[in-house]
Image: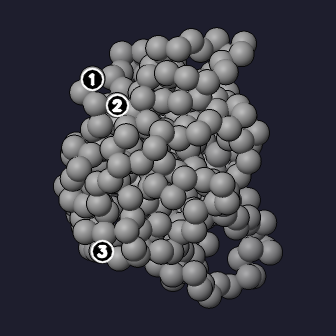
Amino acid sequence: MRAIEITKPGEPDVLQLCERPLPVLKTGEVLIKVHAAGINRPDVFQRLGKYPVPPGASDLPGLEVAGEIVDGDLGDSGFSKGDLVCALVQGGGYAEYCAAPLEQCLPVPEGLTPLEAATLPETYFTVWSNVFDRARLSEGESLLVQGGSSGIGVTATQVASALGHRVFITAGSDDKCRAVEALGAERGINYRDEDFVAVVKELTDGRGVDVILDMVAGDYVAREIECLADDGRLVVIALLGGPQANLDMNHVLRRRLTITGSTLRPRPVAFKAAIARQLREQVWPLFAQKKIKPVIHHVFPLEEAAAAHTMMESSAHVGKIVLQVLAD
């Protein structure tokens, strides 16, 4: 099969087209003939040598795919060979075939193509796990998303707003802010021109937000503490601003704040399977109801993976970047 491998840690041009044998299935896995694979920021970190591959996972990049089940023991899953699915994987997505745990597969949502469905697993699993499970965003509560124009950002915005929450986002330009407002955000905050703490306080009459989804960390953490409501929760899922933060713990004590974080890739199949069940029950119907939709910024052919990574690193995109492997 054709695949994209990382020849050595480095710039996007280290991503090279190669020939690899088909994946050997483990117990509980299915083989997917890949139509498309999503590009995610962790793929860039892996290419740079900063995101280790979990033991036993494919060294090929790619954490989400969509395509056709062509092999594997399907048991009583309800899936059959030939079904179109999307799946969260630990690696191997940039290829014509990919092994995926059966329990991490979801049907392509009604009305979507596999190309569109390939944009869903990594961001939807991440958002549901962190915003709704870990941070417990509940009825009547509000959400601030840092990096609102990213794949994670547009997913969190759409799902939270569709479920009735007030959503505020930060982004690096007015155009990006307006784009995410069109997806359901109440207010986009251009972090280059505005103080997100002051804006959030003004929009919430000084109360602050209940939950913050943060991909920045670093010096953002102290400011985020300022704009959390009492009993608020900050969940960190990336460290684009650096791993070190200084903050006043008096706020945490007096206002009963929670600071937490997680990474998804190393978690066991059982953990991800539970998320898949929740997504299928509570989120997947929203696609058929037209309350949420995939947001694709650009599609590249498989052999142009380097160009896709260059675009990802430019942060010029709104939504997802996709590698098309097989025409829908």
Mark pair 1, 2: CA separation: 7 Å
Label 3: few (<14), some or many (≥20) within 10 Å? some
Query: For this view, does 131 lie left or right of residue 147?
Result: right
Which of the marked residues, 1 or 2, is nearer the chain's N terminus? Answer: 2
Is there a contact, CB below 8 Å, between mark 1 and mark 2?
yes
What residue do we see at 42% from left, 29% from top? 33
Quarter of the rendering containing residue 327: top left
**What colour scheme was applied to this rendering of the protein?**
one colour
Say which residue label 1 marks.
328
Reading the image, the residue beneath label 3 is 11
Q: Which residue is mark 2?
A: 35
* Towards the viewer: 85 or 282: 85
Q: Position of residue 285 (x, y in %)?
A: 51, 18
Q: CA distance from mark 1 to mark 3?
A: 30 Å
Q: Nearer the viewer, residue 123 or 149?
A: 123
Q: Amino acid at mark 3?
A: Glu
Amino acid at dot 1: Asp
What whole-number distance in Å separates the C-alpha atoms at marks 2 and 3?
26 Å
The amino acid type, in three-letter code, at marker 2 is His
